[in-house]
Amino acid sequence: MVTWAKELAEVHAKHVLTPWAVQKRASGPMIVRGEGSFLYDSEGNRYLDLSAGLVAVNLGHGKEQVVQAIQQQAARLCYASPVFFHDQRALLAQGLSQCAPWSEGARVFFTTGGAEANEDAIKMARMITGRQKILSLYRSFHGSTLGAGTLTGEYRRFAGEPGIPGVVHFWGPYLYRSPFFSANEGEESERALRHLELVLLHEDPSRVAAILLEPVVGSNGVLVPPAGYLSGVRELCRRHGILLILDEVMTGFGRLGATFGADRFEVVPDMITFAKGVTSAYVPLGGVLVREGLAATFDEQPLWCGHTYSGHPLAMAAGLGALAAYRDEGLFERAGRIEEWLQRGLRELAKQSPLVGDVRGLGAFFGIELVRSRQTREPLSLWHKPLSQEMGWLQQQLLGRGVYAFCKHNVILVAPPLTITEEELQGGLEQLGETLRRLWEEPSF
Ligand code: PLP
């Protein structure tokens, strides 16, 4: 068994180009199975999936209802050209439209993932408004294709530079490291909105097609906007005829304790882009939810968007299975309970470890920001550099203790499957606490 795994690891290293990695350093356990909150490797080790993969496996691993839906569809029809109508596509689009926040109704354009969804959303915004510019945030991630990479506001966009024309970045609220020198949430919200207003003024709002942002910034640090910020952005968009696109690739499908972040923040966008949780990541799927009034634009003019896999039958079946599972188990709301457990557990962790500078989050979506000193707030890893030695060490130690957690910059993302039990979560947080204690005491750093 062990020899087999070793041989396969060599084959992997020799033939696979691993995403976002210096290839000669790419390594990791060989995952062969998943069940509930846990992954298992080829040597029988178990890992608690504390970040639900890349904040995606909202239903936990191996949910029977979804697996069966995929299997049944695979036996019936694996693929037909997207020019055909298709029963599962009709039903999933209807189900998703019913989840959307618009009383006027909605339509869905399906893609294969989140980056493509954002690409298509900005193309639609340009076609609908006849304007070219798109505004998005610094410290954001919207995908790694050329266009979505340009929307992205951190270093992962650099490889694609100069990117696509017409994208302008602005600063969003982040009270712990306020770009606006604010002392409290009210100030941060007000100043961030004033800044956006100025950016709009200097870009000429009549040239701006859309503002695209994550309701809670995800992989760039789990940044929860202060009260009034998102509604303020909505109001600026309304005033200037700009479309508001919420990138809910991470925040959708129950992550924040509501179907979408739009519901949790009571903000009504014009489009929502989604992926990940829509199938609990079992089959690649993304898409754009468009409010009916805008979707109707394409009744008379062509929709210049299309993909071979748009509305792929296996992805549609997975999405329908996932929607049924979310509903049957009340999982869109369950993150509310997980939020209580996380608030309690992470507050305790922060008390124990001087490395914890800030803990923030909502629902089942929390970030632990690590610093070298609480006084200086010097980050444990710099935003524009690959993970520091310490953060890499921390991730490896956690794996050794049977916990997988997604770390970005100096932040650990705690975003477990929405099915996690309190006991499983508690076990994961204990290992996290122990690892932070060892990191603090580690003489080599
Ligand atoms: N948007 C957000 C907010 C994301 O977090 C991600 C991926 O993590 C994407 C878009 C890109 O999605 P995908 O990796 O499916 O292309």
Image (spheres, grey):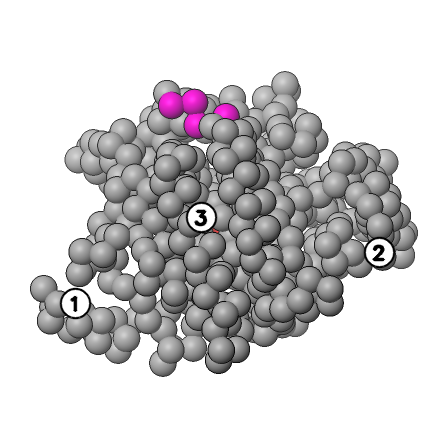
- Closer mark to the observer between disc 3 and disc 1: 3
Residue 245 appears in which quarter of the rendering?
top right
Q: Which mark is residue 367?
A: none
Residue 249 position in % (x across, y down): 52, 44
Q: Name the one closer to the observer, 278 or 335.
A: 335
Q: Is residue 240 left or right of residue 358?
A: right
Q: Which residue is mark 2?
A: 180
**Residues at marks 2 and 1 touching, judged by CB atoms closer than 8 Å:** no
Residue visible at 30% across and 46% down in the picture:
38
Residue visible at 36% across and 73% down in the picture:
26
Which SS class for mark 1?
helix
| 160 shown above or below 328 | below
Range of magenta residues:
329-333
| 247 shown above or below 333 | below
* Disc 1 within 8 angstroms of ligand 1 (CB): no
Q: Quadrant of the N terminus?
A: bottom left
Q: Earlier in the sequence, mark 2 or mark 1?
A: 1
CA distance separating discs 3 and 1? 29 Å
Residue 33 position in % (x across, y down): 22, 50
Q: Name the one closer to the observer, 154 or 38.
A: 38
CA distance separating discs 2 and 3? 33 Å
Residue 444 position in % (x across, y down): 48, 80
Q: Which residue is mark 3?
A: 429
Give the main secondary structure, helix, strand or loop, of the magenta stretch: helix
Q: Which residue is mark 1?
A: 5
